[in-house]
Amino acid sequence: MRQRIRPSHLRNSAAFVAAAAIVGAVPAVAAPAAYAEEGEPSLVISSLPRTSPKPGEVYDESVVITNKGTATADGVTFRIRLTRGLDFPEPVEGCTYSTVADEVRQALCELDTVIEPGASIETPVRFKALPKALMEAVEYGTGPTGETPAEGFGDSYHRLTLTADSSADLVAVGDDTEALAGGKQSVTTQLRNAGPGWIQNQESDDQTALMVQIPPGTVATEVPKECAPFGIDGPSGPGGTPGKAKYVCWPADHTIEVGESLSFTFMLDIKDDAKTTTGEVKATSVYDIHPAFDKNPANDKAQIRIAIPTDNEPGPATSGGSSTGGSTDGGSTTGGDGNDPDGQSTGGTGSTGSTGATSAGTSTGTSTGGSTSGSIDGNLASTGSDGTPLIAGAAAAAAALGGVLVMAVRRRRAAAKSS
């Protein structure tokens, strides 16, 4: 007959490792557990306490597993999953380790124990924060009767978001180029993560982004699909929409690794009467709220400068006519048409463009017919303690831009005002 293993023995035999920091982490809220039908165990797990470890520190806490069913749980499969800024301190006997989708580290541990109805056991959860730890998440627990847990959360399987005591330095990179009035010119902007932490927001839909102000006197005719028009306080239309004065751009998977640069290239039509003009790029969030983890705002802004020679100055050999003097004062139109409902001018559509497919730390790419490899034709769904499973990626925060996004924008705006 199998003997019940003492908690002290479990602590040595069942180990789970994960690392990262916690800031505003909210454990999954489980509904009150009801007793299962007769003859079946029903396991309930306690929640991990919050913390905010520094990179290199080890998180060492325990959870309690209680059997609220009417039958004995004979053996328990306990699983822990960690985002990429966390890791297990050391291997533990009885645990199998692997890396699953989106670089999520997983430990699957077999607890050779018996939990009688009404009884509880305690088991440790240990993980360490890596040097690049910042916004992290941990999944932990078992199935309702002690089996391997399925995807999703409940009484026996929880999710905890963590924010490490660290930072990530966002850097905005603009462009400095030349063009002829009446011609066309591409400009490439970048959002770079100078570290030390990697970026993937696990706690909200306010994802890291790059704000792009189109230089006055020009019209954006080709726009990356990762770049949506920016309204009063958030995205206001589908990605790739031409002819707007301001855009907000972010990666489809909401992830920016340490040292990675995301590139967003726009094709601009230069007005016939345009003179040298300047736009701006800014490292921010999709709701234009400065990320709290960025402690160095000095490099958050950069310029897009387009030098346009006058009639008396030689210019670069680009297509288009010559400048005719005069200047513009923001906004842009094409073909002399009127403004759109947002009060921004409407431009034509182009045949080629550039988008951000990440490669070797730099996001570059091309598109044809106005389509690109990325997509932002969705709203940002909030993530949190009971959010998307890690193997689906924190990235799974994108759905359709529309009414839900408007509500989210208002929610974020209200939060910003109250903070």
Image (tube, rainbow, N blue to C red):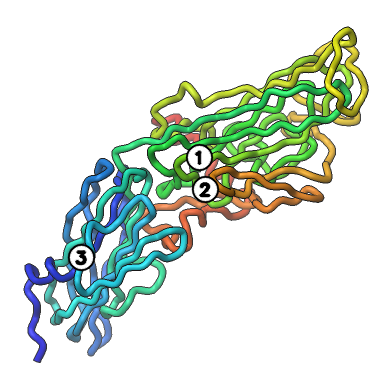
Of the two numbered discs 1 and 2 on the same chain, state the one appearing first in sequence: 1
> For mark 1, does the 10 Å Cα neighbourhood hold few (<14), some (14 to 19), or many (20 or more) residues?
many
101 horizontally vs 323: left or right: left
Pinpoint residue 224: horizontal percent, then vertical percent: 70, 43
Q: Which amino acid does the dot numbered 1 rest on?
A: Thr
Q: Are marks 3 and 1 in contact (CB under 8 Å)?
A: no
Q: Give the labeled residue for mark 2.
A: 254
Q: Nearer the viewer, residue 390 or 166?
A: 166
Q: Nearer the viewer, residue 192 or 42?
A: 192
> What residue is at 15 percent from the left and 71 percent from the top?
13
Pinpoint residue 319: horizontal percent, then vertical percent: 89, 28
Pinpoint residue 57: horizontal percent, then vertical percent: 22, 46
Q: Give the labeled residue for mark 1.
A: 208
Q: Which amino acid does the dot numbered 3 rest on?
A: Ala
> What residue is at 36 percent from the left and 61 percent from the top?
105
Q: Give the labeled residue for mark 3.
A: 15
Q: Nearer the viewer, residue 101 or 226?
A: 101
Q: Which amino acid does the dot numbered 2 rest on?
A: His
Disc 3 to disc 1, how far (Cα)?
34 Å
> For mark 2, does the 10 Å Cα neighbourhood hold few (<14), some (14 to 19), or many (20 or more) residues?
many
Q: Confirm whether residue 64 shows in the render.
A: yes
> What residue is at 90 percent from the left and 30 percent from the top?
335
Q: Confirm whether residue 406 shows in the render.
A: no
Q: Are marks 3 and 2 in contact (CB under 8 Å)?
A: no
Callout 1: SS: strand
